[in-house]
């Protein structure tokens, strides 16, 4: 029986709230707090049990600390934006509360995806006896757990990792992003980095393309190599990895729009002067694009996200692929959201459950692969993200 404060009432916040509300035996009390309280109330109205809502500015550490001291939750689930990670961690430390998020901290003025700012909190959380779990979404999140589970059960040593994120869904708009447009566009326009022989190698964004056929008739898609934050923690925690790459599917239409928007400067993150005021182009673009939380009813098709690992077992090379397939419309029927928010929100709920049940509770700041993957994998099967495992004879994306 535990009380959680969920911060952020966007696409992911809606799913986490639904999923926590489905498990009253674990999440006995839920508070949903965000910058715009009406959005919290709209989510609360979809549920069949009462939850409390609140307005909070998570950039304001003093205000958030006072709020947490008053509410006294057992855990804060941060599904606001990556910009708020450090202020929410500071407030959790001040109020003595465990912490979980789904994306690493990003400074507003540089699109940098690095754990260094949050890893620097290790001693603070350890000394305070508090747990901070970083990146408990799907990727990062379930992908870290998949890799750890494969390494634990199939290999003596793992050598190559390919994380493949395919979204075979179609929302019918010429251009829209499936999660926060600002965060999404910062991520996909960033320089690509992958791990090769002991170092990160940089290549231009979207410069490496491959074709991938998903299992179970989800289809064949063009996937592009890009940087993703879980690569940083996984190569640190699995030092035997010689190569680690992240791939995501993009349709030609999405890429064409992105190219044009980039060429005309609409994806820029530096403020520009416009009619006497400063505006950030990407923030203006966000205001024009469809809100990802409204895509649920119109998105059809499936996601297929998984990890292919090559390594050695008893001196022999093996290849193992673990993946989850999720249907957008099934997600909408269950929690009124499309599968991108769903596949992020469910692992956030499971990570929270792991901490609250004491299975993943340990003072300090941790990435997902630093805990036993087995209970998390069991819960993915139970709570809406069933996975499959197959051994492959060969695998090559080059
Ligand atoms: P949204 O933009 O839909 O939602 C973000 C919410 O946070 C909004 O309700 C917003 O308020 C609120 N918010 C923003 N700033 C503040 C603040 N200062 N104080 C309080 N609330 C604030 O984003 P998503 O739901 O799509 O994404 C949420 C998080 O999940 C992001 O960090 C994203 O990077 C991460 N993510 C992780 C994935 C993974 O697999 N690991 C995949 C997808 C997303 P308002 O409504 O007023 O704008």
Image: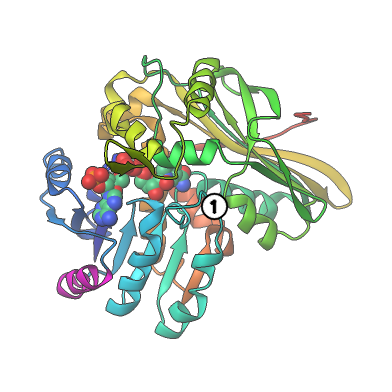
In this view of the protein, can residue 101 be seen by the observer? yes
The C terminus sits in image quarter: top right
Residue 247 x, y percent position in the rendering? 63, 34
- Eyeballing the image, is 146 above or below 289? below
Q: Nearer the viewer, residue 278 or 229?
A: 278
Residue 190 x, y percent position in the rendering? 57, 41
Residue 11 x, y percent position in the rendering? 30, 39
Q: Nearer the viewer, residue 131 or 372?
A: 131
Q: Residue at x 47, y 36 (%)?
A: 185
Colour style of the rendered protein structure: rainbow
In this view of the protein, can residue 15 be seen by the observer? no
| Residue wearing tag 1 | 112
Q: Quadrant of residue 319?
A: top right
**Does the magenta segment cover residue 241?**
no
Q: Residue at x 27, y 41 (%)?
A: 276
- Eyeballing the image, is 70 above or below 143? below
Q: Quadrant of residue 193?
A: top right
Left or right: where does residue 266 sit relative to residue 92? right
Q: Nearer the viewer, residue 9 or 191?
A: 191
Main secondary structure type of the part rendered in magenta: helix
Which region is colored magenta?
61-72
């Amino acid at each position: 029986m535990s009380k959680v404060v969920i911060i952020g009432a966007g696409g992911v916040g809606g799913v986490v709230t639904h999923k926590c509300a489905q498990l009253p035996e674990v999440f006995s009390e839920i508070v949903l707090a965000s910058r715009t309280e009406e959005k919290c109330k709209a989510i609360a109205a979809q549920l069949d049990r009462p939850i409390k809502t609140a307005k909070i500015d998570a950039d304001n550490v003093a205000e958030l600390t006072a709020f947490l001291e008053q509410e006294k939750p057992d855990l804060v689930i941060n599904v606001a934006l990556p910009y708020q990670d450090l202020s929410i961690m500071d407030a959790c430390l001040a109020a003595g509360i465990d912490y979980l998020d789904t994306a690493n901290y990003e400074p507003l003025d540089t699109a940098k995806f690095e754990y260094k700012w949050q890893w620097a909190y290790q001693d603070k959380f350890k000394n305070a006896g508090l747990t901070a779990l970083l990146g408990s979404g799907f990727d990062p999140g379930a992908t870290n757990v998949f890799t750890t589970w494969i390494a634990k059960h199939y290999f003596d040593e793992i050598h190559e990792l390919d994380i493949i994120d395919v979204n075979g869904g179609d929302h019918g708009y010429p251009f829209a992003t499936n999660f926060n447009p600002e965060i999404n566009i910062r991520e996909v326009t960033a320089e690509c980095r992958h791990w090769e022989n002991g170092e990160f190698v940089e290549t231009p964004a979207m410069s490496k393309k491959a074709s991938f056929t998903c299992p179970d008739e989800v289809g064949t898609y063009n996937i592009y190599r890009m940087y993703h934050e879980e690569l940083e923690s996984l190569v640190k925690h699995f030092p035997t990895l010689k190569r680690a790459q992240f791939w995501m599917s993009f349709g030609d239409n999405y890429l064409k729009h992105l190219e044009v928007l980039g060429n005309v400067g609409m994806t820029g993150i530096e403020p520009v002067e416009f009619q006497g005021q400063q505006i950030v182009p990407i923030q203006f673009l966000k205001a024009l694009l469809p809100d990802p939380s409204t895509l649920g009813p119109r998105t059809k098709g499936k996601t297929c996200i998984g990890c292919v690992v090559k390594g050695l077992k008893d001196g022999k090379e093996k290849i193992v692929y673990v993946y989850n397939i999720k249907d957008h419309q099934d997600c909408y029927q269950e929690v009124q959201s499309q599968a991108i928010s769903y596949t992020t929100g469910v692992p956030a709920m499971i990570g929270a459950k792991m901490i609250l049940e004491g299975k993943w509770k340990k003072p300090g700041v941790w990435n997902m692969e630093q805990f036993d993957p087995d209970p998390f994998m069991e819960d993915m099967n139970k709570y809406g993200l069933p996975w499959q495992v197959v051994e492959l004879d060969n695998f090559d994306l080059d």
